[in-house]
Image (cartoon, rainbow, N blue to C red):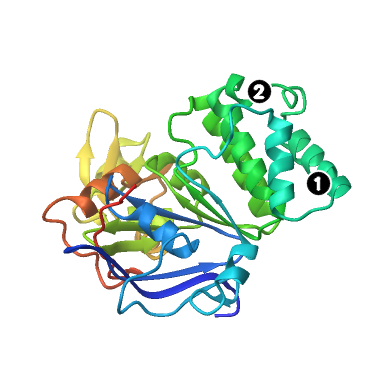
Amino acid sequence: MSDLAIAAQGLRKSYGDKLVLDGVDLAVPAGTVFSLLGQNGAGKTTAVKILSTLISAGPGSGPVRIGGHDLAAAPQKVRAAIGVTGQFSAVDGLITGEENMLLMADLHHLSRSEGRRVAADLLERFDLTEAAKKPAATYSGGMKRRLDIAMTLVGDPRIIFLDEPTTGLDPRSRHTMWQIIRGLVADGVTVFLTTQYLEEADELADRIAVLHDGRIAAEGSAEELKRLIPGGHVRLRFTDPALHRTAALVLDGAVRDEESLTLRVPSDGSQRALRLLLDRLDAAGIEADELTVHTPDLDDVFFALTAPAAVPAPATTATRPAPSEEDVR
């Protein structure tokens, strides 16, 4: 457990008679991006609020450690180790960007000179120096989000919770935010990310967990999750019609396309499956001119796992029971 930035066992939370988190286990290695996906009201924000000490876990929850500190026994140490950027901006629009930064420096008890140095460095890092003296209310959505994260970094946290940080941003601003997140991780920061943009999780996350009906429906890397869903295949293209016909005989279940001289072979896209396929082709002396692997994308995974009658993921994946939750905001 020593290499885990976040470790939670049996996380539970209810609001009245509504059970929203029901035994969620989380294990996030330091210096990685962990993304929690789920439908609106699935419990993502509630999980973030518990892990960031904003609300308490429910009765029956297991132990939680953040940055090596016990959440229940040492909440102040946890707060000192983390930063939180919520769904709604913490930026005060009535004061300038620089004043927002200096206010955070005061809250972190930095000296006046240190606070100004840290604020100037972060404003430059997030390309906000030119706008630093302007009221934050005049900032664009992307600028406000960058300022929000810059304010979060004033205390130099090693673990950052980003709750849907790019919601409402245009594509260019979203990509800028992705670059910022990658830069944080390159510096050794651990990022716990909730998002509704599956492309975002695919781009950024080392591991992804899908929260549904109070349980973790599946967890793994993006590629591992994609292999859970049927429909993956390997496409082989040939220029020699004779080889195309021979390969179709060798590869059971392959779907032939005579016009394009291609074969579509069902496959989960794993290294083992590809090795077996290539071994069969080599044994028959067949060499395809082109080989491409096609797997379902995260949209397919998400829809399959969060459907009303979603089937639990196979035991071969790193699945964890996770409770269904309705975010209370």
Residue 224 drawn at (x, y percent): 38, 59
Residue 315 occupies quadrant: bottom left
Question: Residue visible at 48% across and 36% down?
Answer: 166
Q: Mark 1 points at which residue?
A: 115
In the rendered structure, which amino acid carries the disc numbered 1? Gly
Relative depth, front residue between 301 and 263: 301
Q: Name the residue under label 2.
A: 135
Q: Of all residues shown, which one is farthest toward the right? A: 113
Relative depth, front residue between 56 and 144: 56
Residue 250 occupies quadrant: bottom left
Q: Image quadrant for the N terminus?
A: bottom right
Relative depth, front residue between 19 and 282: 19
> 268 left or right of 51?
left
Q: How busy is the neighbourhood of tag 1: few (under 14 within 10 Å), some, or many (20 plus)?
A: many
Residue 76 drawn at (x, y percent): 60, 69
Mark 1 or mark 2: whose residue is earlier in sequence: 1
Q: How busy is the neighbourhood of tag 2: few (under 14 within 10 Å), some, or many (20 plus)?
A: some
